[in-house]
Amino acid sequence: MFMLSVAHVCLSLLAFVSAAPASMSSEPPTKSTSLMPSGTLSVSAADASPTVPLASDDPNYPLWNETVDYPPQPIRGPLGANQLGPQNVQIDKENPDLLAPPTTDAGTILNAKWPFALSHNRLNTGGWARQENIQELPIATEMAGVDMRLEPGAIRELHWHTADEWAYILKGSTQVTAVDQNGKNFLETLNQGDLWYFPAGIPHSLQATDDDPEGCEFLLVFDSGTFSDDATFLLTDWLAHVPKEVIAKNFGTTIAAFDGIPGEQLYIFPSNPPSDNATAPSDPQGTVPESFGYRLSKVPATPLAGGTVKIADSRTFKAAKNIAVAEVTVEPGAMRELHWHPTEDEWAFFLEGNARMTMFGAEGNAATFDFQSGDIGYAPAPYGHYVENTGNTTLHYLEIFHTDIFQDVSLSQWLALTPPALVKAHLNISDELIASFNKTKATVVAPDPYLRAY
C-alpha cells in the first residue's frame, strides 16, 4: 500500500506541473491525447468504494488569463477544438473557465456574472448611474445594484424607493440626509469604505463633497432583483405632475411662489459642495434613533490565514434590517473556503483583483465563472461555492445578502464536527486527514505550502 501511495503522489505532482496555466507558456494550447490519471493521495484503489469510480486528479486550473499573447482556445486535454470563426479575444481571456470549463463543470447553471461595464449608462450633468437587475442577470432575483458617480457638489436628488437601499462608498465622500416616518432627521458625511442604509419609503438625498477633487462614486444595492433606479420616486418628478394650485395650497402660499420649480425630474444635477461640518436642521422630533450611516472603514478587519474579513449586519449596523455584508480580502493563491449560505442568496461585487468561483447547484450541476474588478457575481442559496484568488495581487470583494444577520456554513467545519467514521465512509480518506480538518471556520484559507513549493 505504501508503494501505491507513493505512486499516486508522484502522479499527482506530475498532474500539477502538467496543468500549470497556459499563461505561463508562450505557446497556444493544443489538444492532448489523454486525460490525467485518477487516484487518491491517501488510500489505495483497493480500499475505495466499488460503487463509483474515483474522482480525477486533474487540478482543472484556468488555462490562461489576460496576459497571454495568443488567442485562447476552447480546448482542455483531449476535449474541444480550436475556434475557426470570429473570436472576441479579450472577453475569452477574461473568462477562461467559460471558454474551456473545468472537467468538473456539468449540467445547467444560469449565468452568474455581470460586468457593470456592459450596463447601459445614464449620463447627467454632474454624474452618471448604471444598474444591474434581473433584466441583465436573471439569476439575481433577490437583489439589484447601481453604480453611481457624482462630481463635487453634485446631488442625487431628494427621493425614495419601493426597496431598501444599502450603499458602500467606493471613492471620495458623500453627505447623506434623510427624514423618517416620525419626522426625525439625519445628516452625516461618510467616506470611502463606509456604508449607509435607508429602509423602503424613507426620503433621502446624496451629495458629493469636494474632499476628493473628483467627487465620489458609490455602490448601491437594493433588496429586490426587479428593482430599477429609473422607477425612483423623485421630488421634482412628483411636483412637476401636481397642479400648481394644489402645491400652493399645500404650503399655504401663492402659485407664483413656485414659478421656478422644474418641469421634469432632475435625477442627478450640479450644485455647490456641502460643508463637511454641516448639521441637520433643528428638529422638534429629534434625530433618528438609529443612524443611517455606518463607518465600516474604521472597523478593524479580522486577520485570517489567507486574508481578512469584516462583517456588518444588524448586530453592528442597527439600521440595516434587511441587508448584511462581509467585506473580504484574499491573498494571491488563497481562497474563500468551500461554503454555502443556508437561506439567503449572495450578491458579490469585486473591487480589486481576479477571482474564480465554482457554484454547485445539486443534481450534478456545477459551473465556474471568472471575475475582475467591477464585476458582479451571484450565488443562490444554498449553492455550494468558493472564491479563489487567481491573480498575483490581493483580491478584495463584497459578499452582500438580503438578510439581517450574516450566515454561512463551512464545509471543513461540518466535516470536522461529524463522526470521523462517517466522513471516511463517504470520502475514502485517511484518519489523519480527517483529524486535520478545522473545527472552527477558516473563512479564508491560505495556499497549501506543499503545493506552493511546486
Image (cartoon, rainbow, N blue to C red):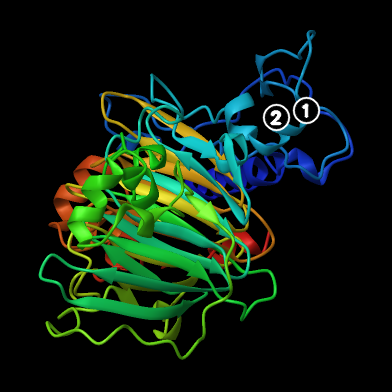
> Amino acid under label 1?
Val
Marks 1 and 2, how far apart at CA: 5 Å
Q: Which mark is residue 89?
A: 1
- Residue drawn at x 42%, y 67% is 327
**Residue 400 drawn at (x, y percent):** 34, 55
Mark 2 crowdedness (10 Å alpha carbons): few <14, some 14-19, many ≥20: many
Q: In this view, does 249 lie to the left or right of 100?
A: left
- Residue drawn at x 44%, y 39% is 358
**Residue 402 drawn at (x, y percent):** 24, 51
Which quarter of the rendered picture does the C terminus lie within? Answer: bottom right
Q: In this view, does 237 lie to the left or right of 203?
A: right
> Amino acid under label 2?
Asp
**Residue 378 drawn at (x, y percent):** 39, 41
Kind of element beneath mark 1: helix
Q: Do the residues labelled 1 and 2 touch (CB within 8 Å)?
A: yes
The image quadrant that residue 399 belongs to is bottom left
- Residue drawn at x 59%, y 39% is 121
Q: Can residue 67 be seen in this view?
A: yes
**Residue 446 drawn at (x, y percent):** 50, 67
Q: Name the residue under label 2.
A: 92
Kind of element beneath mark 2: helix
Q: Nearer the viewer, residue 11 or 402?
A: 402
Q: In this view, does 95 lie above or below 1?
A: above
